[in-house]
Amino acid sequence: MPRSRRDEVPPHDFVPHDRTRQAIADRVLESHRSKPTFYVSLDVDASAVLDARQALKAAAGEGQTVPTVNDYLLKAAALALREHRRFNSWYSDQGLLVFHDINVGFAVGTPVGVLLPTVFAADQKSLVEIAAETREMAQLARNNRLRASLQRNAGFTVSNLGGYGIERFTAIISPPQTAILSVGAAQPRPVVCQGEIAVRPMMDLTLTVDHRVHDGDQAAQFLLTMQQVLADPDWQ
């Protein structure tokens, strides 16, 4: 029986799923199906971070690694996780695994898909140490040379699309983690400061949360701690 025109497939290129793409698909589908999530957002003034980074950049010698805004965010998240330990966790049907070490993953776009390298003991490392590690791991990831051992045991993840000019988005939690922080670009916006209108580089932080583990007030407190830490980055 001849096929109907409705069944015909238009001219196309067929791109089979490779192992990495299939693994990503399986993980995000698992997250979408199994996790009852909600989202909490907060606009944060990025002035202090941008000023601190500019000062480091001006003082850096030739060939010295200058921390990116994402490095500041990873360190800030690690410090916030010290105060909000339940967000540094994995979910299981038997209970919650709240980790002692604060290992923070970060999203890296590669030709084969998004990979999640891990900064181990991020709260214990200096900003310069974090910057050196993230730079190396991002390069390995983009060259398809990132070892599996460098993508394990993160209790929390930061996903930052600010470098693309994206102002706001909501990332999907990487199972079995219980939260992920989405970060948008720092954009100049009018805000009220001490009763007057001023222009500040405002950055959106959105926390995607597993509602089986966390409630709205806990998510709000985490973001407020992030805001406080980023407002005074003396920990660099």
Image (cartoon, helix red, strand yellow):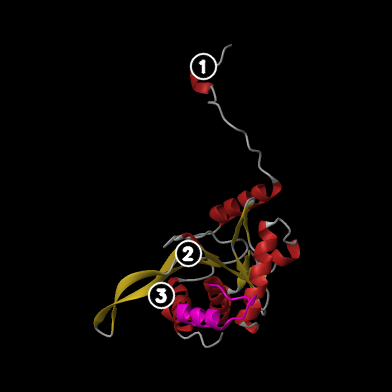
Q: Is residue 43 left or right of residue 159?
A: left
Label 2 and label 3: CA atoms lie apart by: 13 Å
Q: Secondary structure at mark 3?
A: strand
The residue at the far front in this view is 62
Question: What is the crowding at mark 3: few (fewer than 14 residues within 10 Å), some, or many (at least 20)?
Answer: many
Q: Is 101 included in the stretch rendered in magenta?
A: no
**Three-letter amino acid code at disc 1?**
Ser
The answer to whether 6 is drawn above or below residue 78 in the figure is above
Picture quarter containing residue 205?
bottom left
Q: Is 56 included in the stretch rendered in magenta?
A: yes
Magenta region: 49-68
Picture quarter containing residue 236?
bottom right
Front tag of 2 and 3: 2
The residue that disc 1 covers is 4
Label 1 and label 2: CA atoms lie apart by: 47 Å
Tell me residue 171's x, y (percent): 51, 60
State the residue at coordinates (56%, 61%). Answer: 173
Label drawn at residue 162:
2
